[in-house]
Amino acid sequence: MALNPTPGLPPFEYIKPASLAEASAFLAEHAGEARPFMGGTDTFVRMRDKAWHDKFVVDVKNLEGMRNITFDPQNGLTIGAAVNMNQVAASPFAQEHYPLLVEAARSVASYQLRSRATIVGNICNASPAGDTLGASILLGGVLHVYGVDGERDEPLSEFFHGPGKTNLKPGDIATAVHFPLPPADAVGRYIKLNRNNDGDLAIVGVTVLGYPDSATASGFRFKIALASVAPVPLIATAAEDILANSPITDDTITAAAQAAMDASTPISDTRGSAEYRKLMVRNLVKRAVSDVWGKLQG
Amino acid sequence: MAHHTITLTVNGETEVVTVPAHMTLLEMIREELALTGTKNGCASGECGACTVLFNGEPVNSCMVLAVEADGATVTTVEGLAHDHQLDPLQEAFVESGAVQCGFCTPGMLISSKALLLRAPNPSDDEIREALVGNLCRCTGYVRIVDGVKKAVKIAAQSEE
């Protein structure tokens, strides 16, 4: 039999509900055999690879409000679930107030993939390598979810439980992600280590957000999220504490980077070994924190 | 298995097609509309050979369901030339030697077209970034980037 290197998708039914209520009811009724999709950039790859076997794919991206991106100077940025990553990167509000999110979104895959891929989809897919997850958590992101019991908010800091595992239940549809205004004078940086610069998945991803904070001994607060080095986006709290509790010097940054490395529990895979990933966490945290620190000092 | 009848505009022509739910836009373009310029490379959104303009934006057509294209406007590589006149990008690719085996070329042209639509005078870095999602195993990319730069010059000259 001839090997077909590029097989098509397995058969399934396409459902295009008219409302969130209809979509949610359908997904709940068909738990385990139906899933909502946005850009499909993860869904269709998984289905083609026969990792997912859903009978129904539910297209929720045309439902009300899904394509809106709005900014309120008091409350912050709300990105509808169907807003693609190029639209986020091109948003003047995102560029001005959330450049860290723009930097992360622009690092994902390629331009044409980003015209389908969404931040909310990236969040719901819950890959440990997800490029926009770290920025979304550090910026205080909250997922708006419509479920069978009505609407609810899911803070992203408590949302992820493992690769593909989140607080979402059958019948849930993520409708938007909301970000409060970032702390005053915050500076962010996302460093993504790839095998090449051609839209590859992160071997290691380091997201850092730093800002002045009079409540800490150092006068600054640094938040650090790590991608691809744990089953979930890893918040390097020990490293954050070191940077909060001691005056920021090269030695403090080095100690924090070491703490981030010690907290990492990566696996070895085709993209890199666990040992390599841990060392890269140390080096890239040092680099990212130093970059942010340099900008904070003006 | 349910089929869906969709209406869309492809290269300026209205098309009515009946497709199964799991057919990709790529499969529909190649097999239902017989527009075989768009290539099936990796079928997983990585190589860019299947890139088309979907409502004006470049997408990997292997990652879009045909049924999602109901009401959409699609431009494939066949839609770039008009009245037997090549698009400046096509002309520039020929002149620059940007085509070797040709498999990646339709995707390269569409991604480049999308770039020039949003940034008519791109820098080298912008060109390379716009083509990150288009793999070429022949040219080493230098002549493709040259081709895009030449297209900008051709377009500027034709406006003078």
Image: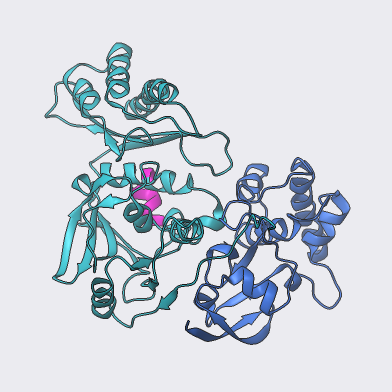
From the viewer's side, name the closer residue of A138 and B18: B18
Where is residue B75? Give x, y as percent: 66, 72
Q: Looking at the colours in the rendered structure, which chain would you say is drawn in blue?
A: B
- Between residue A41 and residue A101, name the one nearer to us: A41
- Chain represented in cyan: A
Give coordinates of residue A139: x percent, y percent: 27, 45
Task: Specify whether A105 is left or right of A245.
Answer: right
* Residue displayed at 48% across by 44% down: A107
Where is residue A111? Give x, y as percent: 55, 54
Query: Which residue is painted at 27% across and 25% down in the image?
Result: A263
The majority secondary structure of the magenta stretch comes to helix
The C terminus of chain B lies in quadrant = bottom right
- Verify whether residue A97 appears in magenta: yes
Q: Is residue B58 visible?
A: no
Q: Which residues are magenta?
A: A92-100
Is A196 part of what is drawn in magenta?
no
Q: Nearer the viewer, residue A51 or A283?
A: A51
Residue A117, can we see it?
Answer: yes
